[in-house]
Image (tube, helix red, strand yellow):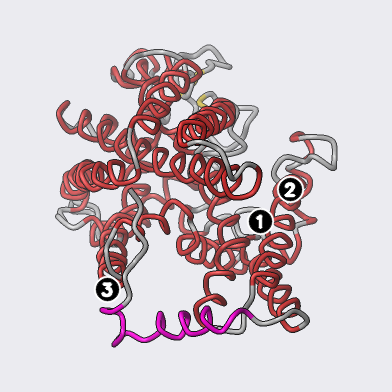
Amino acid sequence: VAGQMRGVGIVFSRFLEVDITTGVLIGMAIVLFYAVIGGMKGITYTQVAQYCVLIFAFMVPAVFISIQMTGHAIPQLGFGGQVNDGSGVYLLDKLDGLSTQLGFAAYTEGSKSLVDIFAITLALMAGTAGLPHVIVRFFTVKRVRDARKSAGIALLLIVILYSTAPAVAVFARTNMIETVSNEPYSEMPEWFSKWELTGLLTFTDKNHDGIIQYVQDETQNELVIDRDIMVLANPEIAQLPNWLIALVAAGALAAALSTAAGLLMVISASVSHDLIKKIINPNITEKGELMAARLSATAAVAVAGYFGINPPGFVAAVVALAFGLAAASFFPAIILGIFHKRMNKEGAIAGMVVGMVTMIFYILKFKFGVFDGGKEAVGALKDSWWFGISPEGFGSIAMLINFVVSLVVMRFTPPPPKDVQELVENIRIPGGEKDIPAPQVH
């Protein structure tokens, strides 16, 4: 939720021309109202509409910029295509050249090892399958067949969005460097001053020559750009029409609001129903349960708002940590629960606890420096990463630990009831799916 709060705050801070803190606070109020008023099905239906908005808002500018820079209408082709200036230079080669001229590493070299990239990718994939706010969406359909069909369609739509993201990043980076590097500050376009108001883009004229020095050397660099603004600022940098800029803002809000609302719904339902009603107070009234849900949602928004204002990293990194936690905790339980009918609750719970605790410990140590003197020490801890894997990718290792613990504990504890094992068998049979109704959530 913290990543979504940050995203909403950036949109509001830019277009309401307020600082990022005020933007996040406005976003907190809207998201809380949005989640408390809507129910599970209500949020599901609005998320369908919001996806249509966000995919349109993300793809249309990407297509325009791809045509503008490479002549390709498909951004994925523009990503690997030649620059549309007759030079015959490929876009990625041009960006590599611009980056090295400024002292940065070549863009295509990357800054992470192959092992770390593999671990991050695995954590993202496994985490996607284990995200609670995604899983509960399947409870809103009537049959298992519908759930499977919707999963396939969702994956196709996700591919469209995610495969375009690298192209958008290259377009934005290239345009940014060409627009601001070694250019007079007085001649910067209007978008530059607008983003300065948010505090997410700052220029400090260290040598007082009025020229923007954007270089890798921190002692000479005069421009600091928050990475979270790049997608939103991209249409402005490319000088696209105002209606496209507004469209991107609408898409960013739709994406953040829909995701945040889904997450808050899961949090509030877990606390009020699964924790309070089932364990702490089984006799709680519906009114009391509703109040508990709203209070837990409010608390979640408050915590997320704090991390939105004081983020542990840029939005993509924060989201990657969330995916890593999902991979380390839920994914093994889901896989073993479906494909190993001997798996019992003792094994699943033990694995989830160990996996989640391991992941949280790793995040606290290497992302926040909790055990080593605070965030100032984080940079020096990179050489101490276990197996050379960053916190964003460590969910893969914690996931493997979860699998091992679950299987070991399962061997030394009683098997699940016979009817549960038969249910697992039925779930795995595609031919029998038409006879298996899915649980309903209202």
Tell me, yes or no, whether the highlighted magenta stretch contains residue 420: yes
Q: Is residue 169 left or right of residue 45?
A: right
Please state which amino acid type lies under the numbered disc 2. Phe
- Residue density around tag 2, few if under 14, some if 14–19, many if 20 or more, within 10 Å: many
Q: Which residues are magenta?
A: 416-435
Q: Which quadrant holds residue 329?
A: bottom right
Please state which amino acid type lies under the numbered disc 1. Ser
Mark on residue 366? 2
Q: Is residue 29 left or right of residue 152?
A: right
Mark on residue 350? none
**What's the residue at 59%, 45% (across, down)?**
282
Q: Position of residue 229 (x, y in %)?
A: 41, 32
Number of on-image labels: 3
**What's the residue at 61%, 59% (across, down)?**
393
Tell me, yes or no, whether the highlighted magenta stretch contains residue 29: no
Give the mark, 2 or 1, whose residue is nearer the N terminus.
2
Residue marked by disc 3: 145
Q: Which quadrant holds residue 156?
A: bottom left
